[in-house]
Amino acid sequence: MLAAPEKTTLAGWAIVAAHEIDRFEAQASSTAENVRAVFQRALKSVGSPVAHAPLLWMLWFRFERAMFEQLLRKNDDVGSRYARKEMAAQMERWKAVSLDGLRCLPWWRDWVLAGLAAFDRGVDESRRELRDLKRVYNVLHERELRVRVEGVEELVDDILNAGAGDSTR
């Protein structure tokens, strides 16, 4: 593990992260929490020089997505409450990485699109879906990015037309 996160380079963190992922996949004394700790230390430490590195964020994003897809395959025919909870928890971790990365990489279109794919998976309830999309919108708004949503113009027109129809009665 690198000693001083604020003095390390992108190459150093990429090597450490890739090594930890390899150890995890080989089941050689590493856990998913160890992998997450490496990414958190590299990307979320105060003053980290690699906090805005797309490579590391994408490695972390792909790791969390792979963990979710592995659970999905494993629990495909198991409908137990524990399996659903485990998948929901992993989905939240995947979404959290997406949002955290969005705060550091709002300028990278591919990141925004990859993150939206995370928010599009595994949605059961419409209220939850709207809450998640609102979180994405709030992060984009924090970064003063314009968001164009198709259908908003038609919705506004419908509301205005419905209001105009009520006032003529």
Image: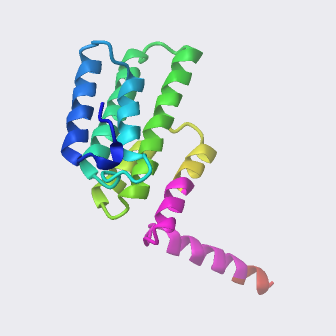
Q: Nearer the viewer, residue 20 or 67?
A: 20
Q: Nearer the viewer, residue 30 or 70?
A: 30
Q: Please state, as top left, top right, bottom left or bottom right, where the C terminus lies in the image.
A: bottom right
Q: Please state, as top left, top right, bottom left or bottom right, where the N terminus lies in the image.
A: top left
- Taking the image as shown, residue 158 lies to the left or right of residue 94, namely right
- Taking the image as shown, residue 126 lies to the left or right of residue 95, namely right
- Look at 52% across and 29% down and name the residue there: 89
- Look at 50% across and 67% down and name the residue there: 141
Residue 146: where, in percent of width, then height? 43, 72
Q: Nearer the viewer, residue 73 or 111?
A: 111
Location of residue 39 (image quadrant) = top left
Residue 84: where, in percent of width, then height? 53, 22
- Taking the image as shown, residue 160 lies to the left or right of residue 44, namely right
Question: What are the residue bounds of the magenta stretch?
Answer: 134-163
Q: Main secondary structure of the magenta part?
A: helix
* 87 shown above or below 57: above
